Image (spheres, rainbow, N blue to C red):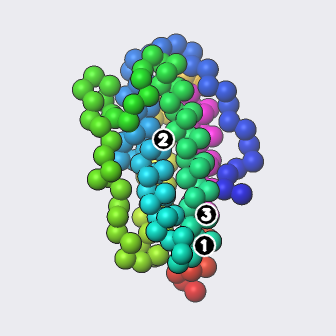
Amino acid sequence: MYSVDLPYPEVNVKDKNPQYIDLILQNYASSISEFDAIAQYTYHQISYVYENIEVSQTLRGISIVEMHHLELLGEILVQLGAEPGYWINNKKPHYWSSKLVDYDLSSLKYILTVDINDEKSAIKQYKETITKINDENINDIIKRIILYEEYHIQLLLGLYKKYVEQ
C-alpha cells in the first residue's frame, strides 16, 4: 500500500570504487537521506497517532519503505568496502544528528509540506548521484528508489488534499 509493486534489483556492485562511498553515504545518512527520512517520518507518525490515524499510518508505512531503502544503500556501502555508519564523508566522518529532524508540529499543513519537500530533495539528490556513478547495478537500485520516493509524494499530496485543502 505504501510502495510500488515492483521488485528491487539485487545488490551486486561491479567493483569496490572508493569514489562512490561518499556519494552513497550522502543518500544514506545526511540531512537529505534515508536515515533522516526514517527519523522524520517516525517522529511525525508518533506525533499524529491520536490526532489523525490515517496520516499516522501512512507516515509509518512510508517510514518502513524508507527502512528498506536504508538497508539497500547499506548493502551497497558494504560491497563498496565501507562501513554502513550514520555519517557522511568516509575519510573524516560527520555524524548524523537528531538536530536534522524538523520538530515543528505547528500544523498538519506544515508537516506534510516538509515531508513532500524532503521527498523532492531526496529525488533531486538521487538523480545527481546517478550522474556521478558508473555502475549499472547501483544506478538501477537508485532509480527504483526514486520510483518509490515519487510514489510517497503522491501519497503525501493525497493526505494534503484530503486534510489541508478540504
Which badge, 1 or 2, comes first in the chain's sequence?
1
Main SS of the magenta part reads helix
Provide the secondary structure element on which disc 3 rests: helix
For the record, the magenta segment spans 138-156
Q: What residue type is labelled 1?
A: Ile
- Residue extending farthest to the top is 15
Seen in the image, is 77 located left or right of residue 53?
left
Which residue is nearer to you in this view: 67 or 125?
67
Which badge, 2 or 3, comes first in the chain's sequence?
3
Seen in the image, is 73 located left or right of residue 162?
left
Q: Mark 2 points at which residue?
A: 126
Name the residue located 63 percent from the left edge and 40 percent from the top edge: 144
Which label lies toward us, 1 or 3? 1
Task: Give the crowd class for mark 1: few <14, some 14-19, many >=20 residues within 10 Å.
Answer: few
Q: Mark 3 points at which residue?
A: 58
Membership of 134 in magenta stretch: no
Q: How many marks?
A: 3
Q: Name the residue under label 1.
A: 53
Separation of residues labelled 1 and 3 (CA atoms): 8 Å
Which residue is nearer to you in this view: 61 or 134?
61
Task: Give the crowd class for mark 3: few <14, some 14-19, many >=20 residues within 10 Å.
Answer: some
